[in-house]
Amino acid sequence: MKIGCLHLDTPTVLAPLAGITNLPFRLLAREAGCGMVTTEMVSADGLVHGAAATFDLLRSRPQEKPLAVQIFGSEPTVMAEAAAIVEVSGADVVDLNFGCAVRKIVRAGAGVALMREPQRAESILRAVRNAVKIPLTIKIRSGWDRTGRDALAMGELAEACGVDALTLHPRTAAQKFSGSADWSLIAALKQRLRIPVIGNGDIRRADDARRMMAETGCDAVMIGRRAIGDPGIFAEVICCLAGHPLPIRDFNRRIEVMRRYVLLSVSCFEETRAARLMRSRLAWFGKGLRNSSGLRQSASRIGSIAEALDLIDAFQHSQKTAQRGAGTRPVISGGPLRPDPV
Ligand SMILES: Cc1cc2nc3c(=O)[nH]c(=O)nc-3n(C[C@H](O)[C@H](O)[C@H](O)COP(=O)(O)O)c2cc1C
């Protein structure tokens, strides 16, 4: 799979997830074999105005590459300037958010609002294309009605403006995250365009990724919510696409990922910030395991990295004890996908 001149090792992409796809999380996804990782959406205004917290979102490491940085905004000149900043920061791809359906973003004329303003969208695409040499991608939704005509029109416009690849999450703006993703629209878009199409939406298990590629002809799959507690999904998808047996899913693997997340976080941020992050994030990795609610409660009181690691040890011990008691492997389920705010 190629995006412009950029080659991806595997046809898998980590979705942009606000508040989630930070540097340590992206490193985890790459370690699991993900072909390209994406930052959360970054405010173009914040970059252009030099906001420190916004610039912090551009921090990267060579090990996570290739990296796509997603920006959002509504002003062509601001988007172009922000894209140039992203390029200078060393990102491999700049991705434009044309799909966010959060009210605040849509009211500001950004995200999916651009799908009903083709002229403004075109100005943004042309301005950004002129501003950067690195590959340019956009991420869209179905648009404003179920026919998907906005998506097909935006796909053609993007291709004409020199966009190198496009991701489609086939839900309408109004749908937000209800109902199911209409994969047939990914197939329709793929038939219309020459640039690569990345399919996104409702991949819950490895075989869903294989099915999405087979049914739609898309060039790669993007995975969001399913990766949150278990970035190991990328390794499973890669095995499944190659026709190999899936890696064994057991609690030790999930707990190793938890430990790794703690260590990567403390290596990326200073300790107090990393420990604070663990209060809300550690529990993601225990989802579907026994006593995950106990883990969540205890994690909310974490005060240091040593405490986080002790908590993981205790959680692992409790899983082993439960396994011995039941004489079986603890149940692991991905659970339903969480409702998505974006
Ligand atoms: C918590 C959360 C944050 C998200 N943040 C973004 C974002 O910053 N930019 C974006 O384009 N999409 C965002 N999305 C949408 C996802 O990238 C993806 O399109 C959507 O979750 C559907 O894919 P999935 O079914 O694999 O989760 C977000 C979704 C969730 C659940």
Image (cartoon, helix red, strand yellow):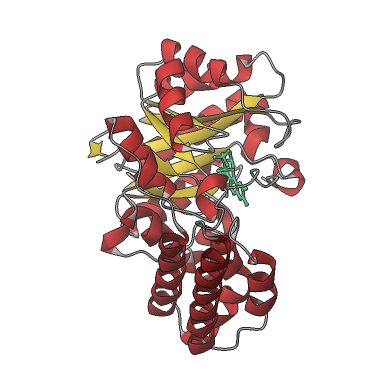
Q: Position of residue 46 (x, y in %)?
A: 57, 61
Q: Ligand 1 falls in which quarter? A: top right
Q: Position of residue 223 (x, y in %)?
A: 48, 41
**Side of 253 relative to 168 (left or right):** left
Q: Tell me if residue 5 can be seen.
A: yes
Q: Position of residue 182 (x, y in %)?
A: 61, 21
In the image, residue 215 sits, relative to residue 273, either above or below, namely above
Which quadrant is the C terminus positioned in? Answer: top right
In the image, residue 168 sits, relative to residue 257, either above or below, namely above
| Quarter-of-image position of residue 11 | top left
Of 82 and 35, which appears nearest the observer? 35
In the image, residue 105 sits, relative to residue 154, either above or below, namely below
Which quadrant is the N terminus positioned in? Answer: top left
In the image, residue 235 sits, relative to residue 262, either above or below, namely above
Q: Residue at x 37, y 27 (%)?
A: 162
**Side of 202 relative to 177 (left or right):** left
Q: Tell me if residue 3 can be seen.
A: no
Q: Residue at x 26, y 62 (%)?
A: 62
| Quarter-of-image position of residue 149 | top right
Q: Position of residue 132 (x, y in %)?
A: 34, 43
Q: How many marks?
A: 0
| Quarter-of-image position of residue 136 | top left
**Side of 175 relative to 51 (left or right):** right
